[in-house]
Amino acid sequence: MKLKVKDVDIATGGVRIIILNSADAQKLDLHHMDRVMVRKSNRKITAVVDIAESEKAVPKGRIGLMEEVLDDVNAKEGDIVDIKLAKKPESVSYIKKKLDGKRLNYNQIKEIIKDITLNNLTDIELTTFVTSYYIRKSDMQEVADLTRAMIETGEKLNFDKGKIIVDLHSIGGVPNNRTTMIVVPILVAAGYKFPKTSSRAITSPAGTADTMEVLCSVKHSVQKLKRIIKKVGGFIVWGGSVNLAPADDRIIQVERPLSIDSEAQMMASIMAKKASVGSTHLLLEIPVGRETKIKRKSRAEHLKKRFRSLGRKMGIKVKTIICNGNEPVGNGIGPVLEARDVLWILKGDKRGPSDLKNKSLMMAGNLLNFVGATTRGRKMAKEILESGKAYEAFIRIVKAQGGKEIDPDSLKAGRFSYDVCSERDGYISGFDNQGIARVARIAGAPRDKKAGIYLYKHAGDKVKKGDKIFTIYTENKIKLSYAKEAMKKTKTYILRSRKTHL
Amino acid sequence: MKLKVKDVDIATGGVRIIILNSADAQKLDLHHMDRVMVRKSNRKITAVVDIAESEKAVPKGRIGLMEEVLDDVNAKEGDIVDIKLAKKPESVSYIKKKLDGKRLNYNQIKEIIKDITLNNLTDIELTTFVTSYYIRKSDMQEVADLTRAMIETGEKLNFDKGKIIVDLHSIGGVPNNRTTMIVVPILVAAGYKFPKTSSRAITSPAGTADTMEVLCSVKHSVQKLKRIIKKVGGFIVWGGSVNLAPADDRIIQVERPLSIDSEAQMMASIMAKKASVGSTHLLLEIPVGRETKIKRKSRAEHLKKRFRSLGRKMGIKVKTIICNGNEPVGNGIGPVLEARDVLWILKGDKRGPSDLKNKSLMMAGNLLNFVGATTRGRKMAKEILESGKAYEAFIRIVKAQGGKEIDPDSLKAGRFSYDVCSERDGYISGFDNQGIARVARIAGAPRDKKAGIYLYKHAGDKVKKGDKIFTIYTENKIKLSYAKEAMKKTKTYILRSRKTHL
């Protein structure tokens, strides 16, 4: 059937959707959520049908195309396109199979992951995939197959075969966990390859990629990354620019609103990203705490075992550190403030927060022991850091990624600021990570690199009435007022009359 | 935050959606799928956030509102509305609880069903509800609670307490299963109350409501229905107009594209509709066959037990008939052609298809035995039918619903027709119900009441080359060409050289 295009000024971001008038839909016996093939001359794509009951939305004889579809078939308002019924993707029947508790083989899993990557599945189908893998158990072979499918549908950065390639992953939840930017240069200074892809913030005020971006570009081609590794031994870039295991992004769109995480899918997407860069040794950090992804020690222990087992199947050695995830680490929160903390530590400046330094040394030390560089990893890490070699390696990485050496004191937070002071005498018994993150985001972080929060106090500290607890920074006066407004409704820190141990 | 309305010319049909520019979303720290309260003077509603990355779709400072939201807050292009972050509905946390395999209590279930009815849940949340109930087992108490929640969130038509109120339900799958229009008048003629709500076609060429609509209106107010029952003892109306257990409609929107059916939800929505009209005796028909909903006898037997048990909890006696669902019943397919079959049978005309007559007598007889009218139900049903009393009762019902007595021979099928003839000698070994339904729908059924198919042959019949097997009818010449086109790709009947028993 030939229809005239109506340009619908919307992008769905997800599956391609076309809108038909109900009369036209009936002619072709098409229903809501059916698939059609849309063709304009030699361009054709498959899209999902939405049905407009009113002539106002989409009149008879016309077809509403959203931006993605317009682009895909190269059509504009008033053009004629041809549509016909198309089949559901095969992968939908495999998703149903998993829903029914059956085991999928590699080819079936790959077909699903491919369709997720190509945005061929509706929210309904994708949610069924996610909830099925959430409820139905997967044995280790199925998780490995899922991992392989994710690797196959994304880019691969395999570097020097046979060499040790180290990697690090933290299973989310602690704001300003900027250890990566300290651990990578320590390991690189010790002679190891460390191709680190990091995420941008989703619900936090900064991801490692956002913070690194204060100093240099975090988007590079695969070719460029291979050259960087060869030249300086490591990089810290945004994973999204490299397109490793891209199915993950679309799956997260469904998991986030439900606040769920399918274990098989989470494990597969982490391991796929590591395998895609050829990692041989992975240090996995699992912060456990009230506000982190993993609430209980027992679940962390379970994941530890499963990851080791998955690592064996994928040829990656995995070592897991389970740690306390209840406190923010570092003083700065937001890209610029976090980058400054990192540079201070790397340069041996006393203003560098000791909690972040200690945690980074612990992790770098663990990695050094893990790869067999020494049996006293922490000591070795401390020597490399304090000798300035880690700082030198970091600057080499920054320069290779197109940045230059920057004096941390030239990193200034936003022009507008607001001090949050204690209303009375007492003790800080803790911070509310989510509240702090929320205020920092409303102040503009991470897009406004200079926005964020700087903490002066830590859990256990004594405060007097009027003492500054933290400062909110932003480049935008209006955002400062929004952030102050949000402070009234958001718990950010807990003040007690007496010192208490959490 | 105050934003200027952009009228987005689309209706989603599902949850209310607003579209923000990504810059505005960031100011409020809002993400895709978050909830916001949208307010214009004293009108306010909760909607789900979609984020536009481009200025073209929704510019900064503006808010894209779809038709439902514009109506709900009484806003138009250029108006100013206020938005603020709203919480997720409580029901989402209950859905997650079920996803995690925990049991829900009545209040939690009712909260979910209420939000489904009010269109407060996104496709992602609703799919999670459906897949969770599909995978996780529900005990009979939970199914009963689900049933009660569905009753409570819809209209109720409770008539005379204490009297016998009969009902009939067929668990889908057989085209032209128009027994209802014969069974209802037989039971009404025997003195029983029979308030029958029926569905319209979703994927078939006609539902009972579509066929009844050929003769009279099938949309009536609850008040009117109470008067009709009092006056003539029964009605046959479209359930959708009465709003019984309305959550069902939205749930089906998710189940249809997945072709799944959560047993608990299916049982609850059927029983809720029956309980909403005060039924005391329900005859449940489960057709079993390749192309029906229930493929295996064992599953039919399982459902039989579960329905009896649910009936006990709801105070409804349930009798189940498991029958063969592999063949179409009757000759006409499509509203007018089916209505003519029914009238011929009720009037004792020999052209009435005997398979439909026999099946109707079997079911009416079962119901008469079930309510204790006799021990020889089929005989009694046959007497009532052949005496013309069923026809009289039927005409009283038609008149009460605003129709008049119609000569079945005045019911003409579509002006345009196409005869499908046998290409060679042989035996019809069967029909493909889905293929037949597809062609009839493309010809225009059920919206075009006169469109459809008339079968001259049945399974087992001998045919010679050139014999008419069926005729396709339509009022629309173009649709006839579509239907002929579809015939080339669709299996409708199976011709064998030798007589075979299926």
Image (cartoon, coloured by chain):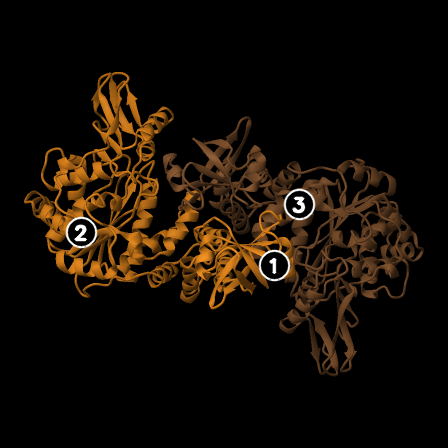
Chain colours: A orange, B brown
Kindly check if marks 3 and 2 are in contact, taking CB atoms under 8 A apart as contact: no
Gap in Å between the C-alphas at discs 2 and 1? 53 Å
The quadrant in which residue B231 appears is: top right
Q: Is residue A193 left or right of residue B323?
A: left
Position of residue A400 relative to residue A104, above or below, is above
Q: For mark 1, what is the residue?
A: A30
- Tell me the tag on residue A402: 2
Can the viewer see residue A286 in this picture?
A: yes
- Tell me the tag on residue B310: 3
Can the viewer see residue A500 in this picture?
A: no
Position of residue A206 relative to residue A308, above or below, is above
Q: Secondary structure at mark 2?
A: loop
- Tell me the tag on residue B247: none
Q: Is residue A64 left or right of residue A258?
A: right
Of residues B463 and B138, which is closer to you in this image? B463
Residue extending furthest left? A387
Please, which chain is the residue tagged with disc 1 on?
A
Position of residue A418 relative to residue A298, above or below, is above
Please, which chain is the residue tagged with disc 3 on?
B
Kindly check if marks 1 and 3 are in contact, taking CB atoms under 8 A apart as contact: no
Say what amino acid the circle numbered 1 marks: Leu
Q: Earlier in the sequence, mark 2 or mark 1?
A: 1
The quadrant in which residue B33 appears is: top left
Gap in Å between the C-alphas at discs 1 and 3? 36 Å
Q: Nearer the viewer, mark 2 or mark 1?
A: 2
Of residues A29 and A62, which is closer to you in this image? A62
How would you rate the neighbour count of disc 2 (Cα within 10 Å): few for under 14, some for 14-19, many for 20 or more?
A: few
